[in-house]
Amino acid sequence: MALTALNPALASLDPDALPDEGADPGDEEAHAVEVRQLQVPMDLHTSRLDKALAELVPEFSRSYLQQLLGQGAVQLNGQAVQKPAAKVKLGDQLTVAMRPTAQSQAFKPEAMAFNVVFEDEHLLVVNKPAGLVVHPAPGNWSGTLLNGLLAHHAGAVQVPRAGIVHRLDKDTSGLMVVAKTRAVMDALVALIAQRDVSRRYLALGQGGWQGAPMQTVDAAIGRDPRNRLRMAVVDLQHSPGKTARTDITCLSTTTAHCLVHCKLHTGRTHQIRVHMQHLHHPLVADAVYGGAAEGGLQRQALHAFALQFVHPITGQDLALRAPPPDDFLTAAEKLGLQYNCPP
């Protein structure tokens, strides 16, 4: 059985994006079962069965192995055993019907249509639609951008994360750059770290814009101490986090909504969503940060419309754009906002 740890497309993935294995073994197909014959060594003599299995089959989590035990998929000296606390002895024979987890099978090519804005032998830029998950994760082990990239070009399997160097949230649309080789990936990561990649967004916010047309939010972001599932502006003297800066310019406003242009100077998780909430303009339909669904939108009103950087191999200045999708433009019109693409 191929293990995910041996797949270069999985290497170097953010551990937050890849939780421990533990999918329901009953979800796997019978033909994928691999039967393993194991013998208990001296150092595991008198150990609990679940501990012995975890040592002898390290590519699967103990919780997953306990699920196999509960299903009768483990035999001890020819007899099915379901008690994790059962003791094993030196020389005991274990038979385990190994079923691949959803995660272990996630990193496979899946053909899908891409809106490719730019592509050469070194990299490509895609216009990700809203609703497309970037990386496999619980609840989305297939049908992700990474799966599509593995099918798009053969070299993707040799590049960590299939060449993905930055992310967009599932419900954020817009431009993403993807490397085709490890050398280009390293170069793009360095450009992003040096802030030499310009990323600009359009967003619809709640509340009429007040104050100067352009405002800079320079406010650190970290985990919300009251809700660990989201981010928040934090005081670095009292809470962990990272510095974050966003330039936000109002393009159109009514008494109840605003259309803004956002330029990132850093790339923190949910940065624009958090900074807009901090300005009391949560994004339309962003329920996580207090935005109500309006204008027909069912996802946060955020689109990465412009990406600019120097090609790390050819030296070409790439300035790429993707107009907002129809749902964004329709919502802006319904909310009475005038859309004019920023220069």
Image: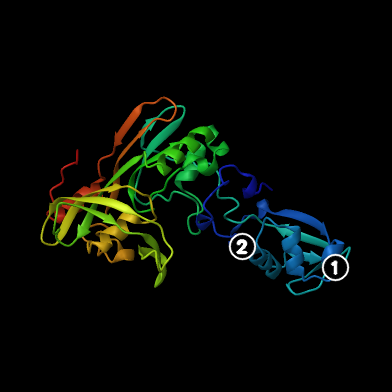
Residue 196: image quadrant is top left
> Tag 2: Cα neighbours inside 10 Å, few (<14), some, or many (≥20)?
few
Q: Amino acid at mark 2?
A: Gly
Q: Secondary structure under badge 1?
A: loop
Q: How many marks?
A: 2
Residue at mark 1? 45
**Disc 2 or 1, which lies upstream in sequence?**
2
Residue 338 point in image, percent of width and height = 12, 48
Is 218 left, or right, of 7 in this rendering?
left
> Tag 1: Cα neighbours inside 10 Å, few (<14), some, or many (≥20)?
some
Q: Is residue 228 above or below residue 126?
A: below
Residue farthest along the front direction in this orientation = 237
Q: Name the front one of labels 2 and 1.
A: 1
Residue 62: image quadrant is bottom right
Is 42 left, or right, of 318 in this rendering?
right
Q: CA distance from mark 2 to mark 1?
A: 31 Å
Residue at (41% x, 61% y) in the render: 241
Q: Amino acid at mark 1?
A: His
In the rendered image, which quarter contains the C terminus?
top left
Residue at (23% x, 51% y) in the render: 248
Q: Secondary structure under badge 2?
A: helix
Residue 56 point in image, percent of width and height = 76, 59
Q: Nearest the camera: 72 or 104?
A: 104
Residue at mark 2? 26
Residue 93 point in image, percent of width and height = 85, 62
